[in-house]
Amino acid sequence: MNARGPGPDRAAIAAMLAAHHTLTLATCRDSLPWAATVFFASDADFNLYFVSDRRTRHAQDMAACPEVALAIDADPDGWHAVRGLQVAGTATLVAGTDRPRVLALYLEKFASVKALFEQPRSADEKIIASRLQHTDFWCVRPDYIRLVDNSKGFGFRIEWRPGGATAASPG
């Protein structure tokens, strides 16, 4: 099954992506790991898009070593409520011709950002809108996604690879 294919596994992953707004991105360069939290949007193929200035540590890490990992999850207080995605993939800069489509995805997910992008009302909003117009978008194309959902039993997981089958495990 591919990302666009039908099925409850794909729907569960898509629902998790739609329900969350931030991801924790893990990068590494020169054997020095780093993690950064970023707002993200996704497409039907589970590609994950976020904005990061090339001067940030994680952007410099991705330029040097594009293999990344990331986590998307909530912060529950009990084991039964643990739900999240673990992703491994490759990060690339979004090409100029694809940027308008990615910007539209991003603004569709974040109505408040869209409002300030289209009509900034304060000096801070003008800065944010300007940066969003000029800052790089990055794309993480997943090689592997694991959805963990302890509400279905301790250690329950669904594993997905592009173009490959999904597998559910009771834990």
Image: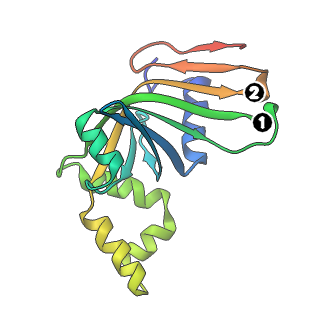
Q: Is residue 112 above or below residue 28?
A: below
Residue at 40% over, 33% down: 45
Horizontally, is 126 left or right of 133 in the view?
A: right
Question: Picture quarter containing residue 120?
Answer: bottom left
> Mark on residue 150?
2
Pick whichever, 27 or 94, lies toward us: 27
Amino acid type at circle 2 is Asn
Is the residue under label 1 in contact with that under label 2 (CB below 8 Å)? yes
- Residue 153 is situated, as x and y percent measured from the top left of the image, at 79, 21
- Residue 130 is situated, as x and y percent measured from the top left of the image, at 29, 73
Helix, strand or loop under label 1: helix
Q: Is residue 92 above or below residue 67?
A: below
- Residue 125 is situated, as x and y percent measured from the top left of the image, at 41, 79
Please name the residue that numbered disc 1 is placed on: 81
User: Tag 1: Cα neighbours inside 10 Å, few (<14), some, or many (≥20)?
Assistant: some
- Residue 148 is situated, as x and y percent measured from the top left of the image, at 65, 27
